[in-house]
Amino acid sequence: MSPPPSQGGAAPAAPAPSATGPGCGTLGRVASLPVCVALGLGCDRGTPAETIAQAVAEALTQAAIRLGTPALEVTAAASITLKADEAGLLEVAAAAGWALHFYDAERLAGVTVPNPSATVRRYTGTPSVSEAAALLAAGTSLAADPGALLVEKHRLRGADGRNATVSIARMPR
């Protein structure tokens, strides 16, 4: 499945905290440049690429509506190291041209998030995968930018019952 045109191209998966892509702008500065975002991705083991891609598309639509612009560019995508071999995630990232970065549970657990989950902690060792991964990949935190998470936790249950979760963080201005 190919990504919507608004998802843009690939860039390094774990940018420096002040980095934005060369074609990125911020709202109110240069209207013709897209707003750069980072995706945090989580899913059940064996979740099909189609479910993950649909969750990403829905989350990007939510972020665009929140910002009032269709011009979003995904410049980073990340998940937990437990998912480094997850076929659906790898397929979606490859189709979109994103380099995926993976963080270990300890690093993700150190990130303050609005929606920690005991269930996620039980299975992964961290209370957050998608929100924490999005913030780390964006190189920001809620302390530095309380509005950084454009989409906190968008969950989609696929036809087979497997879940995909996507969070979207705005890259620092």
Image (cartoon, grey):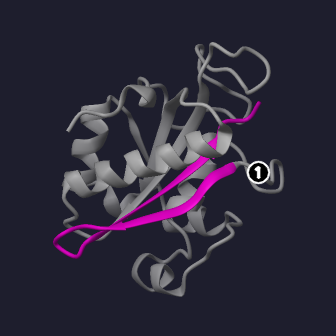
| Relative height, residue 21 to residue 14 (above, below) | above
What's the magenta bit mostly, secondary-structure-wise? Answer: strand
Q: Where is residue 80 shown, x and y percent of the image?
A: 43, 60
Count of numbered tags? 1
Q: Quadrant of the N terminus?
A: top left
Mark 1: give few (<14), some (14-19) or many (20+) Cα within 10 Å. few
Q: Is residue 154 magenta?
A: yes
Provide the residue designation for mark 1.
147
x, y percent for residue 122: 45, 86
User: Residue 99: which quarter of the image?
Assistant: top left
Q: Residue at x 79, y 23 (%)?
A: 28
Secondary-structure class at tag 1: loop
Write the start and end of the magenta stretch as one range: 149-173
Eyeballing the image, is 9 above or below 127? Answer: above
- The quadrant of the rendering that contains the C terminus is top right
Tell me the kind of residue under disc 1: Gly
At horizontal 50% and vertical 81% (from top left) the residue drawn is: 121
The answer to whether residue 96 is visible is: yes
Q: Residue 81, image x and y in percent? A: 39, 58
141 left or right of 36 in image: right
Nearest to the observer: residue 73 or residue 118? 73
Name the residue at 47% across, 51% down. 59
Q: Would residue 43 be found to the left or right of residue 63 on screen?
A: left
Q: Is residue 72 magenta?
A: no
Q: Position of residue 86 (x, y in %)?
A: 24, 57
Q: Is residue 29 left or right of residue 166?
A: right
For residue 137, say whether it is visible: no
x 57%, y 63%: residue? 108
Quadrant hosting residue 7:
top left
